[in-house]
Amino acid sequence: MSSVQRQAWVDLDDRAVAIARALASDAVQKVGNGHPGTAMALAPVAYTLFQRFLKHDPLHPEWLGRDRFVLSCGHSSLTLYIQLFLSGYGLSLDDLKAFRTAGSLTPAHPEYGHTRGVEITTGPLGSGIASAVGMAMAGRYEKGLFDPTGSTTLFDHNIWVIASDGDLQEGVSAEASSLAGTQSLGNLKVIYDDNRISIEGDTHLSFTEDVSARYRAYGWHVIEVNALAHGDVDRAGLEAAMAKAESTTDAPTLIRLKTVIAWPAPTARGTSKSHGSALGADEVAATKRELGLNPEESFIVPDDVLAHARAVAVRGAAARAEWEAEFSSWSNSHPKEAALLARLSNKQLPAGWENAIPTFSAEKEIATRAASGKIINEIAKVLPEFWGGSADLGESNNTTIEGGRSFLPATSSMKDADPYGRIIHFGIREHAMGAILNGIALHGLTKAFGGTFLVFSDYMRGSVRLAAIMDIPSTFVWTHDSIGVGEDGPTHQPIEHVASLRAIPNLAVIRPADANESAIAWREIITRQKPAGVILSRQNLPVFDRTLFGSAEGVAQGAYILKDCSGTPDVILIGTGSEVQYAVAAEALLREQGVKARVVSAPCIEWFNEQSDSYKESVMPAAVRARVSIEAGIAQGWRELIGDAGVAISIEHYGESAAAGVLFKKFGFTAENVVASALESIKKAAK
């Protein structure tokens, strides 16, 4: 709520905080495991935020004008669940009693899409604050789409975060926080719970830096709030700091809040045991005495306390109604922007948008990374919500939107700086880039992408996995996909990476064979609105003449017949990416020997697995047991497609520094080796 709506703090608020602390201890005690200490200490912090600062409507949790809240320390999920219960988001007391049990709405860590009011899945420390940076960036970009002249506050809202020592120790938070400072994200407000306790004890065992100085060096505003003399949170001091943060719009704000974990438990407070273990019945009872509550009662929420807390829904509804009245006026005076907003809110694409996707001539070879760059630019012409960039590899990844200008604050002195620019410069921060893309996707309206070399997908794997868990449309562009990187050598040549990424459930891994496959892949990525990674070549590849080969539309099915033979094939050659060309060349050589081969391009195994059994049988008949897979990476995963008679042409060791053509030949990626492998597989299948 705005400061005008903020009411005087009264005894019922103190009682609500006490109840929140008791509920945290009760919930963990009942299930026998969890993290009570942080939730107990942070109860006044979360309550103050939800009741007095956060712009939200519990009855309409997806209200466009709301603030976002990120509990980066996801292990303290009760900090969030208890406020969702008190605020009226639909959680019940029974849900709190079911904490960390099967099928409950209160799982151990907050899960996006599972519990009403949860904006993001958190748990891996550092990821929440990093994704919050993406949310803040998305907020500014959306402002540029709908209100670039600043004529309204409709699209101005804040991203509030509660983060822990552990969050700030993780490297991803440092990467993202550094970028947030460069971006002057004044809509980002982080409350840092500085309790100096982790599982192993005092954080000074490993974490002694001056966090305030570090964040000031990043370009953040930093406000420090000490604990009260007896150890509890200085709630009034915190509120003053939050009000100052709320009015600060020229840079992100870090509120460094000193707390005592498990306050006010008599013996557990300030101890590492309270971080991740139930307090024990005696300590829970003693804590309730400290809080002025009946130690014999559990999960007790007095009616007057609950009614007082749930009055926040009345204030939220009033704020939303005021917003909607202004929104109606804005819509009438800005019909073009309103129409765009309606389309994006409904997750729709403009009619005929796919006609912008180019087709490529077979007359000239082109690297799929270069083709992807052309496709990105054509998509950008018809989808203003489409933006993105690279981890300082824009020219190599071909991820630059021409004329898009650099997404940088208005105060930046950099060339082409624009607070609403379409080119994101992530810097050499792959993990943060992935988390930021997740935050942008979660914010809800725009489509962002981020690129780096495939070998560095390792650096961002945690963020990619979270995108898959949340089932959000984060798009990862990974170029330089194999030993085709060439002279850069084994440190830059992916070997195990494609298989490793395919092992992530719910992630589409797409490795197109040519420029036109790349085009259909991008169309599918945009249309499907699911987590996806597109893997692209550094080196030029032939563009197949589609009058002679199967249509690239087959990419939409994940695998398709690129080149067929007459009748039943003797062998099926299955390739991906740059290696499909060797399957095509081998088919011609086998035909000369009287061997009938079918060439299957399999750019996306995940999409192929979604197809009907009849379609899969039509592409790879079970009766044809002779099969060869060709992929410049480890063979892991291919056995499911090629079976016990199949032969995998792969690379099971690291590469070396030499020209791409030399390496492909040396390591067996040639038409001749595909032929030999096909004949070997035919013999195995005949046994």
Image: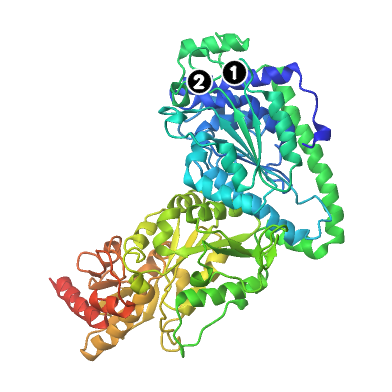
Residue 316 x, y percent position in the rendering: 76, 36
Residue 87 x, y percent position in the rendering: 68, 30
Picture disc at residue 65: none
| Image: 546 above or below 678 | below
Q: Which residue is mark 1?
A: 231
| Image: 666 above or below 173 | below
* Relative horizontal placement of residue 311, taking residue 567 as reference (left or right): right
| Image: 392 above or below 516 | above
Which type of secondary structure does the marked residue at label 2 adopt? loop
Say which of 639 and 365 sits in front: 365
* Relative horizontal placement of residue 676, taking residue 410 as reference (left or right): left
Q: Please name the residue shown 80% across and 27% down the image.
A: 7
> Disc 1 versus disc 2: distance between alpha carbons?
9 Å
Residue 248 x, y percent position in the rendering: 74, 43
The C terminus is located in which quarter?
A: bottom left
Say which of 213 and 286 sits in front: 213
Which type of secondary structure does the marked residue at label 1 adopt? loop
Work out whether residue 619 can be spotted.
Answer: no
Residue 535 x, y percent position in the rendering: 43, 67
| Image: 486 above or below 263 | below
Q: Is the Cβ of the residue at disc 1 closer than 8 Å to that at disc 2?
A: yes
> Which of the colour schemes (rainbow, by chain, secondary structure, one colour) is used?
rainbow
Three-letter amino acid code of the residue under disc 1: Gly
Say which of 337 and 433 sits in front: 433
Picture disc at residue 270: 2
The answer to which quarter of the image holds residue 318 is top right
The N terminus is located in which quarter?
A: top right
Three-letter amino acid code of the residue under disc 2: Gly
Q: Please name the residue shown 46% across and 30% down the image.
A: 204
Task: Give neighbour class at mark 1: few <14, some 14-19, many 20+ (Cα, 10 Å).
Answer: some
